[in-house]
């Protein structure tokens, strides 16, 4: 046993001496030869490449971080570009000459991590913040910063509110103001850009016309239309024409299908209003109205007559169908009002419209023109027609919307009458297949001669379904969650084992 141990010790000493001799031999190699050795060059190259890769990775991360702070690096693949600002918003931001503060009253992490429709709000707020040095977006957690409400003591602030402030003026919005909901409470479209850009425009622009929406004679409400006008930069005021004079700052008086006739005093107020330069009256009629002889006489003085009955179309190609009604599609008249839609083949639809006739083309200081008219294949169904009434083509165009302009020296005023109040119903204004929303806002733009306008539509947040069955969905889930990962893992193990046993 002792001899065996001595032999092992002797063998170990021999190996140590050999290793020592190799090291001494290597140390005797000149430095120049070692620097030019293949082993040294390969090792140095590998080290340099590793360092270069690390430096490049750090630079890329740093540059990406800087760019992400200044620009949006996300790509919006939605059809309506719902997650980025449109051209109108970008133009308004580019022309800003005063600071704008946007406050969202929720912690940023809460909004960003909420997902769903709130992710669109978060994306849009980020875009506003990055697109202009004049715009600052801040997230305020009211629980951690309760003193913030003192800055807006005249407002009642709650979690989830959005504020747009500039020059000491503030516009406040709730989530219900920023999104459109269906009857089940689900979000169907976003008004985020529409509301925020409009607020910025109104708070920073001197060109903010006022529209007085009058009541007192059983007028209908048109919240969708007035909201859209407000979102387009108009100042909306409500007045009772029976008890109040028309606001001296008003540019347009909006009359929506009164169910009772106007009295002489109310008509006098309209006459006094229209005696001023740049004033207009915009009137929408309804098939449900009772007789209004005094209001009718007022319109007739301006060369406009709103008839009885409703207009229907015999040509099926000129009818817009919905689940609840048939809406004739009129022909555009005056190109000044209709050019943007004629050029793009966009149409309006006027359900249950009364006929609107031109009594004269010109008389003294008044000139009339037709803005919308139904085709020669349409006809008027009398108000007292029964179910057996046979509709035939009338053979001539029937007016649907008429403009009357009076010029008396340096004073110009206008009256517009439309036969269908249903043309400005919410469902018609929000229908992206029709031009109703844009057209009826543009009418006000032309009446007020606005140089800069805001006309941004809601964008749909409903994605299209894939149209696959439940079984197909299960199969796809198993394929991407199990099969493909297992195949990739197996291929990696095979490559590893093959290289190891070479």
Image (cartoon, grey):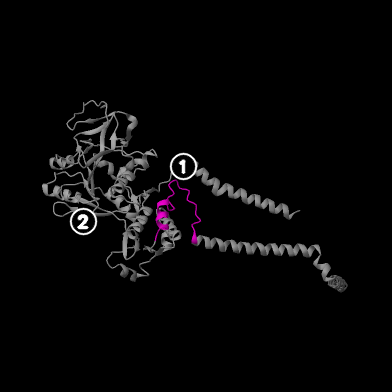
Asked whether the residues under the numbered discs 1 and 2 touch, taking CB atoms below 8 Å apart as contact, a structural biologist would say: no
> Does any portion of residue 434 appear in the rendered image?
no
**Is residue 161 shown in magenta?**
no
Say what secondary structure mark 2 lies in.
loop
Q: x, y percentage for residue 201?
A: 35, 57
Q: Nearer the viewer, mark 1 or mark 2?
A: 2
Which class describes the residues within 10 Å of circle 1: few (<14), some (14-19), or many (20+)? few
Point out the residue furthest to the left here. Answer: 264
Task: Choose the circle earlier in sequence order: 1 or 2.
Answer: 2
The disc placed on residue 77 is none
Q: Residue at x 33, y 60 (%)?
A: 203
Q: x, y percentage for residue 488?
A: 62, 50
Q: Quadrant of residue 109?
A: bottom left
Nearest to the observer: residue 213 or residue 38 = 213
The disc placed on residue 248 is 2
Q: Residue at x 55, y 47 (%)?
A: 480
Which class describes the residues within 10 Å of circle 2: few (<14), some (14-19), or many (20+)? few
- Residue designated by label 1: 466
Say what secondary structure mark 1 lies in.
loop
**Seen in the image, is 288 located left or right of residue 378?**
left
* On-image quarter of the N terminus: bottom right
Nearest to the observer: residue 263 or residue 251 = 251
Magenta stretch?
A: 70-96
**Is residue 89 shown in magenta?**
yes
Question: Majority secondary structure of the magenta segment?
Answer: loop
Nearest to the observer: residue 460 or residue 195 = 195
> Does any portion of residue 130 appear in the rendered image?
yes
**Seen in the image, is 165 located left or right of residue 70?**
left
Q: Residue at x 83, y 67 (%)?
A: 33
Q: x, y percentage for residue 37?
A: 81, 64
Q: Tell me: residue 18, above or below residue 434.
A: below
């Amino acid at each position: 046993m002792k001899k065996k141990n001595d032999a092992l010790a002797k063998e170990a000493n021999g190996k140590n001496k050999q290793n020592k001799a190799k090291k001494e031999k290597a140390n005797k190699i000149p430095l120049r030869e070692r620097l030019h050795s293949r082993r040294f060059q390969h090792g140095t190259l590998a080290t340099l490449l590793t360092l270069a890769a690390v430096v490049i990775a750090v630079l890329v991360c740093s540059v990406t971080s800087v760019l992400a702070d200044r620009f949006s690096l996300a790509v919006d693949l939605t059809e309506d570009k719902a997650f980025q600002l449109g051209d109108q918003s970008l133009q308004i931001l580019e022309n800003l000459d005063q600071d704008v503060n946007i406050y969202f009253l929720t912690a940023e992490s809460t909004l960003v991590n909420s997902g769903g429709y709130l992710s669109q709000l978060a994306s849009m707020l980020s875009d506003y913040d990055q697109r202009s040095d004049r715009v600052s977006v801040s997230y305020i957690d009211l629980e951690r910063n309760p003193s913030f409400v003192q800055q807006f003591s005249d407002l009642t602030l709650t979690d989830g509110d959005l504020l747009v402030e500039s020059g000491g003026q503030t516009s406040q919005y709730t989530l219900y103001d920023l999104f459109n909901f269906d009857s089940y409470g689900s979000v169907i479209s976003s008004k985020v850009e529409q509301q925020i850009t409009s607020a910025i425009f109104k708070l920073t622009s001197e060109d903010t016309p006022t529209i007085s929406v009058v009541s007192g004679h059983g007028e209908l409400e048109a919240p969708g239309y007035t909201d859209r006008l407000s979102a387009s930069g108009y100042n909306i005021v409500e007045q009772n024409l029976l008890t109040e004079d028309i606001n001296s700052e008003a540019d347009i008086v909006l009359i929506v299908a009164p169910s009772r006739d106007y009295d002489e005093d109310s008509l006098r107020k309209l006459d006094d209003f229209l005696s001023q330069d740049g004033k207009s009256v915009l009137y929408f009629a309804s098939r449900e109205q009772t007789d209004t002889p005094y209001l009718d006489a007022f319109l007739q003085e301006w060369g406009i007559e709103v008839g009885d009955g409703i207009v229907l179309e015999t040509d099926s190609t000129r009818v817009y169908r919905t689940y609840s009604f048939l809406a004739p599609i009129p022909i555009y008249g005056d190109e000044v009002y209709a050019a943007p839609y004629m050029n793009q083949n966009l149409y309006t639809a006027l359900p249950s419209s009364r006929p609107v006739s031109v009594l004269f083309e010109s008389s003294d200081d008044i000139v009339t023109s037709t803005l919308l008219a139904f085709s020669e294949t349409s006809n008027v169904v009398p108000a007292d027609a029964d179910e057996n009434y046979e509709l035939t083509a009338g053979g001539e165009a029937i007016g649907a919307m008429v403009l009357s302009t009076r010029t008396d020296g340096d004073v110009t005023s206008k009256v517009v009458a439309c036969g269908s109040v249903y043309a400005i119903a919410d469902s018609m204004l929000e229908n992206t297949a029709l031009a109703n929303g844009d057209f009826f806002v543009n009418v006000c733009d032309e009446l007020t001669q606005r140089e800069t306008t805001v006309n941004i539509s809601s964008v749909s947040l409903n994605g299209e379904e894939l149209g696959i069955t439940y079984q197909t969905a299960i199969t796809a889930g198993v394929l991407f969650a199990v099969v493909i990962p297992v195949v990739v893992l197996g291929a990696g193990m095979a490559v590893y084992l093959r290289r190891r046993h070479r």
